[in-house]
Image (tube, rainbow, N blue to C red):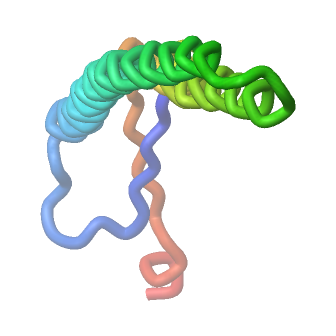
């Protein structure tokens, strides 16, 4: 992979090509650090969500178990099933965060890493204003 930087009608003295190359690499290093930070934060948030979700699952499954003390009938079954379903629904988002939501961040990190390894070339072009003058 290569990055080509084209500079048109540069005002003033030309910047050194090494400075431009370093600026490009510095930009992508910063972007890589930022995505690493976002990924760590995402996984930490996922762990906290998992702890909350597991707590809620235990609470609702316990409530479902307590429905056994109610007289048998439709109300008891509705409550029991409602508590079980609610407990598992509480796990939906934590599992989504930990199983699926982080993959786009990993893909972005991989793309930025490829850009970090890319060679950078600088090309100067004379613009229309200089050609007419």
Q: Quadrant of the N terminus?
A: top right
Please indicate whether residue 51 sits to the left or right of residue 60 in the image. Answer: left
Which residue is at a point 40% across and 51% down the rendered structure image?
124
Report x, y in % for residue 33: 22, 25
Q: Quadrant of residue 30?
A: top left
Q: Quadrant of residue 58?
A: top left
Please indicate whether residue 64 sits to the left or right of residue 52 in the image. Answer: right
Report x, y in % for residue 17: 23, 37
Residue situated furthest right in the rendering: 74
Which residue is at a point 41% across and 30% down the rendered structure image?
121
Question: Looking at the image, can residue 63 be seen?
Answer: yes
Number of numbered tags placed on the structure image: 0
Residue situated furthest bottom in the rendering: 133
Which residue is at a point 38% across and 38% down the rendered structure image?
122
Q: Quadrant of the C terminus?
A: bottom left
Residue situated furthest front in the rendering: 71
Report x, y in % for residue 62: 48, 14
Please indicate whether residue 59 sits to the left or right of residue 101 in the image. Answer: left
Report x, y in % for residue 28: 31, 31
18 and 68: which is toward the camera = 68
59 and 7: which is toward the camera = 59
Question: Looking at the image, can residue 102 be seen?
Answer: no
109 and 2: which is toward the camera = 109
Which residue is at a point 42% across and 63% down the rendered structure image?
8
Please indicate whether residue 43 sits to the left or right of residue 130 in the image. Answer: left
């Amino acid at each position: 992979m290569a990055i080509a930087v084209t500079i048109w009608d540069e005002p003033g003295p030309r910047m050194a090509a090494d400075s431009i190359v370093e600026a490009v690499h510095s930009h992508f290093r910063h972007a890589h650090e930022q995505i690493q930070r976002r990924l760590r934060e995402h996984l930490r948030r996922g762990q906290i969500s998992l702890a909350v979700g597991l707590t809620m699952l235990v609470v609702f499954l316990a409530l479902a178990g307590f429905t056994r003390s109610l007289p048998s009938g439709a109300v008891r079954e509705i409550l029991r099933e409602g508590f079980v379903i609610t407990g598992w629904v509480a796990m939906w988002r934590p599992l989504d965060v930990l199983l699926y939501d982080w993959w786009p961040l990993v893909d972005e990190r991989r793309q930025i890493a490829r850009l970090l390894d890319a060679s950078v070339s600088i090309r100067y072009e004379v613009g229309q204003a200089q050609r007419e003058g």
